[in-house]
Image (tube, rainbow, N blue to C red):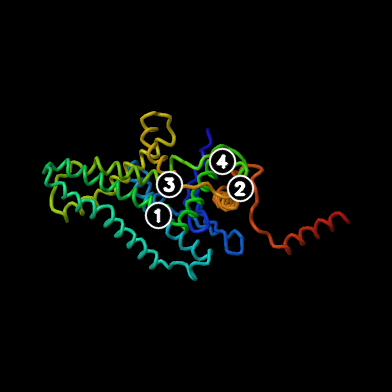
Amino acid sequence: MEEKKITIGGQAVIEGVMMRGPELTATAVRTPEGKIEISSRPVNSISDRYPILKKPLLRGCVSLIESLVIGIRSLGYSAQMAGEEKEQLSDRELAGTIAFAFVLAAILFIAIPTGAAKLFHSITEDPVFLNLMEGVLRLFIFIAYIVGISRMKDIQRVFQYHGAEHKTIACFEAGEALTVENAMKHTRFHKRCGTSFLLIVMLVSIFVFAFLGWPSLIERIVSRIVLLPVVAGISYEIIRFSANSDNCILGWAVKPGLWLQRLTTKEPEPDMLEVAIESAKAVLPADKIPAGSGDYLYHEPEEINEVQETEMECINI
């Protein structure tokens, strides 16, 4: 029986990288003192308790929600370790942050574009055309948002860690030892990137929403929120199949996402790759970490001395 291939994914955080493996998530952060601190958690996916959620379309929605929760929690931990926050987010604060992020996204990518699309009403009242124009405006806002934040100095460092995450995953998928030298050779672009997923969501939504008619503003906003799980499910399946297929049509479907990653990823520094590698190692079973992988964690001098003293005692004996 062929052994199941292990897949890992991740996300850049403040001065670090979060990785997710089959059973664990780990967030590795470079502290102001230069050490790498790691926090690990079991995955505990709801789809493990309810296998029906692993079915096509449903698994995409579940993955989106879980990734959002894990990502915000990891950002909170990284902010604390990087010295930007004193305490980690409580469960209540985490829920509030997620709710705020959802409302903000709904305003920015749903309410504003569908409201602004009414400007085209003077050209035509065709609902399909108006919905398509709404989709174009949504896509424009999304790209403008990416371009805008990519110019911020702090975000540029996050994008460097994003590149480190991709290079490390590519190095692992190539079966090579996880070292800075090996990872540096790989591309910073990846088919399963969250940037690609979000862009696919924008494109799929154009076609899904195009045939919903043109009711009142409130009805349009509600209909788009209600259908968001459907859009996320379709988008997830496109990303999933394109990552494991050589089909040219699916390949072209993810090309725009790879192009957009030129904005959301930057070439990392060697010490950033060290953080990404330690994060990846933390979520891999011990027997799946490629032989010869680097060790970039800081070891206390006392621990090293104790080891050296033990070795000397063995030699004397």
Q: Mark 1 points at which residue?
A: 149
Give whichever of 135, 262 is nearer the camera.
262
Neighbours of disc 3 within 10 Å: few (<14), some (14-19), many (20+):
some
Mark whose residue sits in front, 4 or 3: 3
Does 278 sit left or right of 55 as displayed?
right
Number of residues whose C-alpha sits closer than 10 Å to that of mark 2, classed few (under 14), some (14–19) or many (20 or more): few
> What amino acid does circle 2 point to?
Ala
Above or below 297: residue 163: above
Distance in Å between CA atoms under marks 4 and 3? 21 Å
Which residue was labeled with disc 3?
Answer: 263
Label drawn at residue 171: 4
Q: Earlier in the sequence, mark 4 or mark 2?
A: 4
Residue 317 visible in the shown view? no
Lower position in the chain sequence, tag 2 or tag 3: 3
The vertical placement of 132 against 157, above or below, is above
Measure the alpha-carbon separation of dots 2 and 3: 34 Å
